Image: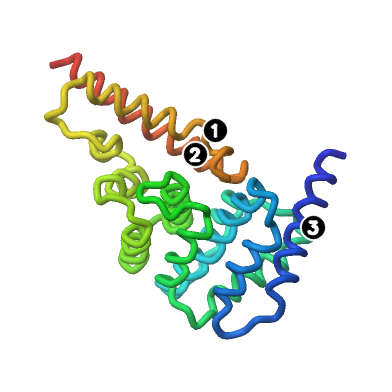
Amino acid sequence: MLFDFACEQISSLWDKLLGAIGDAAGNVLSSIVEAVRTVFEGDPETRRRVSFSVAIIALSAKMAKADGVVTVSEVDAFREIFDFPAKEAQNVARLYNLARQDVAGYEAYAGKIMKMCGTGKKGCPVLEDIVDGLFHIAKADGLVHEKEMAFLSRIADIFEISEERFEAITERHVNPDGNPYAVLGVQPSDDFATIRKRYRALAAEHHPDRLHARGVPTEFHAVAHHRMARLNAAYAAIEKERRAA
């Protein structure tokens, strides 16, 4: 019964959003942004959640265009991040295809999304959440391809994510057994107190309550759990190394 109610809410949400966009063709970016802004005016929590979802859908569509191939595993990874009732698959596919065929390039999308997500602030965590989600999709076929990597790097630049933060995100996804210092965004020369402080700050930043507050849908928490597992493993590896020394 609760699931049915949730599905009705999601269905209503997508009906409103897609209805406001209409059958736009060509440059639909402005239509999407305006629809999110106006349809959910007065409901900032829903608007944040919709903004995040639209960002993942639109940019994953643009990323698929980057390497020219959409694999089944990438579609499955997309569903892990953004779950929706089966009856809404057609609406989500429509938005995905609108974004993929839009004459506006992915850089224009990234710039608008930065503002649409209610941010526009350098280092805003929700923008890193979006990049994290895109990495999750990109690596689903077992490899982040060169063109996808260039795409993700450029998105991070537009989102004003620092080089250090982007390197940490990359390390988590591309090198699962890689440099634990890079995963935490610290240096081997840092003392352990500094490293512990950094780890605790990251753990607090990525707590489920924080994710919910910044508009990240519940479905994304599976990716967040993977992120925390990598942070925990990196901290444990450094702690073990320091104790041995």
Q: Are marks 2 and 1 in contact (CB under 8 Å)?
A: yes
Type of residue at label 2?
Answer: Ala
Residue under the image location 25 percent in, 51 percent down:
163
Circle on res. 224: 2
Residue under the image location 27 percent in, 25 percent down:
237
Name the secondary structure under disc 3. Answer: helix
User: What x and y, as percent, mark residue 38?
Assistant: 67, 63
Side of 206 relative to 50 (left or right)? left
Label 1 to label 3: alpha-carbon separation: 25 Å
User: What x and y, as percent, mark residue 245?
Assistant: 13, 16
Type of residue at label 3?
Answer: Ser
Name the secondary structure under disc 2. Answer: helix
User: What x and y, as percent, mark residue 94?
Assistant: 67, 72
Q: Which of marks 2 and 1 is in front?
A: 1
> Of label 1 and label 3, which has the lower sequence position?
3
Circle on res. 12: 3
